[in-house]
Image (tube, rainbow, N blue to C red):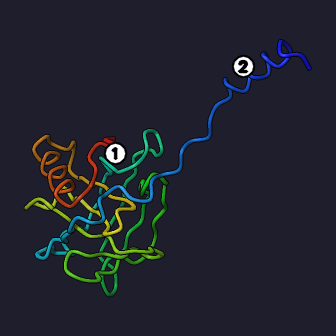
Amino acid sequence: MSRLRLLPLLLLAACASRAPEPPPASFRDAGQPIWSNAVFEPARIAGEWREVAAFAPPGACRPGGASIQPAAGGLEIRGRLCLGGRETALAGPLDVTGPGRLLPAGGTEPWWVLWVDTDYRTLAIGTPSGRFGFVLNRGGPLPPDRLTAAREILEWNGYDLGRLALF
């Protein structure tokens, strides 16, 4: 085949859309320390939550939300969240595994509550592995001061804020 005949095929191949890149293995520097909130009171998170930010590639997920309710023996969660760039359905117990540490039913690793404001309106949650992290809010729009606080604590715990998607 002549070179001129190959040119249209090469141009067509160059225009083909590329598959989206898989989410990174971690959104945080695993060499940096991470701390969960030792004074976190699990019963105070009962209610409706809206996901306002998550570590995810751009456009990977729609914003989600969750309902956390008291249940026999603890808490129960129902909803959908963007976890590490993947929409994840949640339904079942939300176990308290330690100070500021929660494990949803079917979860592979505990969620660490890195920060919660004094009135329990905003939560910043991450994982030691850094596979995901997200911010939940309730009671209306997230005010700038609480967004700033959540961002600062995520960064302090080793998260790369350049990869935080705001919803």
The quarter of the rendered structure image containing the C terminus is top left
In the displayed structure image, the side of residue 148 where residue 25 appears, left or right: right
Which residue occupies the foreground of this view, 45 or 134?
134
Considering only vertical position in the picture, is 40 above or below 147? below
Q: Are marks 2 and 1 in contact (CB under 8 Å)?
A: no
Q: Which mark is residue 75?
A: none
Report x, y in % for residue 149.
12, 51
Q: For mark 2, does the 10 Å Cα neighbourhood hold few (<14), some (14 to 19), or many (20 or more) residues?
A: few
Q: Quadrant for residue 127, please give it.
A: bottom left
Q: Residue 75, percent across and down?
A: 32, 77
Of the 4 image quadrants, the one containing the N terminus is top right
Location of residue 153 in the rendering, given as x and y in whole percent from the top left corner: 16, 56
Outermost residue on the top side: it is 4
Left or right of 97: which side holds 119?
Answer: left
Q: Nearer the viewer, mark 2 or mark 1?
A: 2
Q: Residue at x 27, y 66 (%)?
A: 31
Q: What amino acid is found at the position of numbered circle 2 in the picture?
A: Leu
> What is the secondary structure assignment of the residue under circle 1?
helix
Q: Nearer the viewer, residue 56 or 24?
A: 24
Real-space CA distance between mark 2 and mark 1, rounded to the nearest whole angstrom: 32 Å
Q: Which residue is mark 1?
A: 163
Sequence-wise first label, 2 or 1:
2
Q: What mark, if any, has residue 11 been given in the picture?
A: 2
Tell which of 57 and 88 is nearer to you.
57
| Residue 66 screen position, x and y as percent | 36, 59
Q: What amino acid type should be assigned to the residue bearing mark 1?
A: Arg
Residue at the spot x=34%, y=43% of the render?
165
Residue drawn at x 29%, y 63% is 126
Residue lying at 42% horizontally and 56% vertically, measured from the top left:
84
Q: Where 17 sits versus 162, above or below? A: above
Query: Residue 18 or 2: which is nearer the viewer?
Result: 2
Q: Residue furthest bottom?
A: 73
